[in-house]
Image: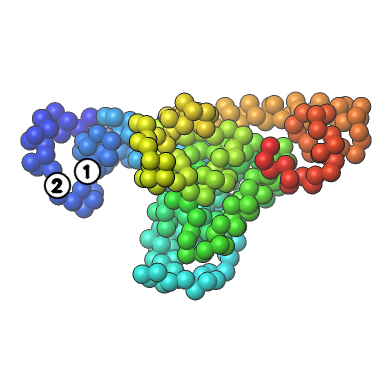
Amino acid sequence: MSWLSNIPPGIKNIFKPKDDSSDTLWSKCPGCGEMIFQRDLDAAHQVCPSCDHHLALAPSERLALLYDDGAYEEIELPDPVTDPLKFRDEKKYADRLKENRRKTGQQDAMRAAYGTVDGVGVVAAIQNFKFMGGSMGMALGEAMLKAAEVAVEKRAPLVVFAASGGARMQEGILSLMQMPRTTIAVQMVKEAGLPYIVFLTNPTTGGVTASYAMLGDVNLAEPGALIGFAGPRVIEQTIREKLPEGFQRAEFLLEKGMVDMVVSRADMKSTLSKLIRLLIKERRQAAAALPAAADTHKPEAAPNANKKPAAKTKDAKKAPPLDKAAE
Ligand SMILES: [Zn+2]
């Protein structure tokens, strides 16, 4: 803990720097308002040592934290058409893209990587909120599809770290089309019998929540993360009711059953590792049991039905595999 924590709050406020962001040695915790020595914050992977508030973690740092020895290979992502609508608001979308590419060193909001987590090969797709609010456009759709393809090819689970304001308005309807496209990417992984896990980080909202971010076999969330579709103000105005305390926060969603676990950053790797092993084991057992079950029933039943095989034979026979997205 820093020496600043021993000073009474009144005095601390007098000496509080006016512009906290200009100070690189100290950071102000948005949770408790305390000044934290940046080095302490870095050592704790951007978690406040005083109040456990989880600040944003850079994608590179998170990947290093996830993978064994911090080593991973970056998956090369396709480069879709830039600015097909020639969109312009206050700025040209093309200029906005350039600016964000320069700022983040990334081509678009999502990156994908492959490496091992406690010895098991895992593909991770990770969103950078600093790149246009982690918004979902065509590049992100391509990134999700590529990550899914690599996962299937390598027989590796796919973990997505979501952080997004939603669809990218500069791409209009094309950004909304990424909702079904990313859902297909998820379905590819699921049909290959591989685990798909989502780690929801602060904030995950809009079309991202309404597509791949809520389709995990297991949905994990970081403490305090804002997760929702529409913002609280819009909801309050629509339903004309005051929203309960902590609405749309990870803990609230856990209580309501929208999220399976709230996992602190310190436990991120160990929890993912345990879940992946558990899911792989379960899938192997299911796969081992499957041929025998399929033989005794209809031989033409979908071979990749990794749920209970006997239940909906009629529907499964008629429906192409992608129609099972909702299951
Ligand atoms: Zn704090």
Q: Name the residue tied to disc 2.
A: 17
Of 209 and 99, which appears nearest the observer?
209
Q: Name the residue tied to disc 1.
A: 26
Q: Residue at x 47, y 55 (%)?
A: 135
Of 298 and 145, which appears nearest the observer?
298
**Image quarter in which the N terminus is found:** top left
Q: Secondary structure at mark 2?
A: loop
Picture coordinates of residue 115, whole percent (x, y): 57, 43
> Is residue 314 something that shows in the picture?
yes
Of 124 and 294, which appears nearest the observer?
294
Q: Secondary structure at mark 1?
A: strand
Q: Tell me if the residue at label 1 has its CB under 8 Å from ligand 1.
A: no
Left or right? Give the position of 225 relative to 111: left
Would you identify the image quadrant in which residue 131 lies?
bottom left
Residue 89 against residue 165 in the figure, above or below: below
- Identify the amino acid type marked 2: Pro
